[in-house]
Amino acid sequence: MAENSKEPCWYVVHTYSGYENKVKDNIEKSVENNPEMQRLIFDVRVPVEDVVEIKGNKRVKSQRKVYPGYVLVHMIETSESWYLVRNTRGVTGFVGPGSEPIPLTDEEYERMTSCQGTIRIDLEPGDNVRIKSGSVENAIGTVEEINAEEHKVKVSIEILNRKTTVEYDISEVERL
């Protein structure tokens, strides 16, 4: 393998799904135990995003892998660094044609690592909900629309024998 530029670049490494953190740990341990590799491999990352799921009335925070089966490695590509990463247990190869790793551009790296948190809500349009507060507390309605970004839900309820759509914060409704 030809020696490439001496500038460190980010590379994408394909792994067995579910082995991303194990691969990250194994690469970091190999680098820690080899002073020569410390000059070639600088960082290993598994891109994750924070996810807030609203189940029942509780917000549950967790992390989710943005790219399952992939790990990012910041390194100077040499035959030694390539060999260390490529022969780490759980690694199936670098992303690129054949066995040649292709470095990410700065824009690609930023796009892959600037993960925004998401919110998952255990409600869907058509679900029946109970209003937990306000002037129509305990009223039963039907979810018409969900806006996860703003944490809002539009609920169709019956007020004075008329169907009315009212927007509530997600925390103000409870799934039946």
Image (cartoon, rainbow, N blue to C red):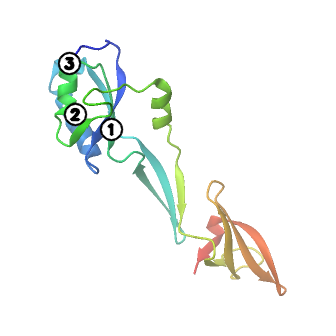
The quarter of the rendered structure image containing the C terminus is: bottom right
Q: Give how far across and how far down residue 119 sits, in percent.
A: 54, 56
Residue at (22%, 25%) from the top-left corner?
82
Which of the two discs, 1 and 3, sits closer to the camera? Answer: 3
Residue with the most extreme front position:
98
Of callouts 1 and 3, which one flags the residue occurring earlier in the amino acid sequence? 3
The answer to whether 6 appears left or right of 132 in the picture is left
Instruction: Give the answer, above or below, for where 104 lies relative to 53.
Output: above
Q: Give how far across and how far down residue 19 sits, in percent.
A: 25, 47
Which amino acid type is marked by label 2?
Answer: Ile
Which of the two discs, 3 and 2, sits closer to the camera? Answer: 3
The quarter of the rendered structure image containing the N terminus is: top left
Of callouts 3 and 2, which one flags the residue occurring earlier in the amino acid sequence? 3
Q: Which mark is residue 71?
A: 1
Q: Distance from label 1 to label 3 (Cα)?
A: 22 Å
Q: Find out whether the residues at labels 2 and 1 contact each other: C-beta distance under 8 Å.
A: yes
Residue at (61%, 58%) from the top-left corner?
148
Q: Find out whether the residues at labels 3 and 2 contact each other: C-beta distance under 8 Å.
A: no
Q: Give how far across and how far down residue 66 sits, in percent.
A: 42, 46
The residue singled out by tag 2 in the image is: 27
